[in-house]
Image (tube, rainbow, N blue to C red):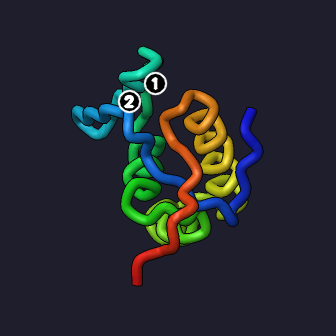
Amino acid sequence: MATISLHASLKVSDDVAFRELDGEAVILNLASGIYFGLDRTGTRMWQLVDQHGALQEVLAILCDQYDAPAATLETDLIRLAGELVDKGLLVENHEPAAR
């Protein structure tokens, strides 16, 4: 599994299609044919990574939005991000952040 930390900045791979229905989502890697289903929390994490990239920022927003311990949200975010990177659905973003 990819080693991901809160210091990572990720972006959606160019070969990915995302569809949401009733708060849950399916992500498809068009190049490999790999698909991945997300529950409501996973879908929210995906949306925040797509919007912000920086996992530290994503975690801060999740902590504001969910009544769960920060350590639990961090573990879940890092685990999900690692799985999505392994499947080619998210990739590291090496571009400087827009200001």
Q: Position of residue 9 (x, y in %)?
A: 58, 61
Q: Which mark is residue 36?
A: 1
Q: Is residue 39 above or below residue 37?
A: below
In-front residue for pair 39/55: 55
Query: Which quarter of the rendered picture does the N terminus lie within?
Result: top right
In-front residue for pair 87/20: 87
Q: Secondary structure at mark 1?
A: strand
Mark 2 highlights which residue? 27
Q: Is residue 83 above or below residue 96?
A: above
Q: Position of residue 84 (x, y in %)?
A: 56, 36
Q: Residue at x 36, y 23 (%)?
A: 30
Other-residue count near label 1 (Cα within 10 Å), few / some / many at <14 / 14–19 / ≥20: some
- Left or right position of 79 against 34: right
The amino acid sitting under disc 2 is Ile
Q: Splitting the image into 4 quarters, where does residue 29 fall?
A: top left
Query: Which quarter of the rendered picture does the C terminus lie within?
Result: bottom left
Q: Splitting the image into 4 quarters, where does residue 88 fall?
A: top right
Q: Is residue 4 above or below residue 70?
A: above
- Left or right position of 40 against 21: right
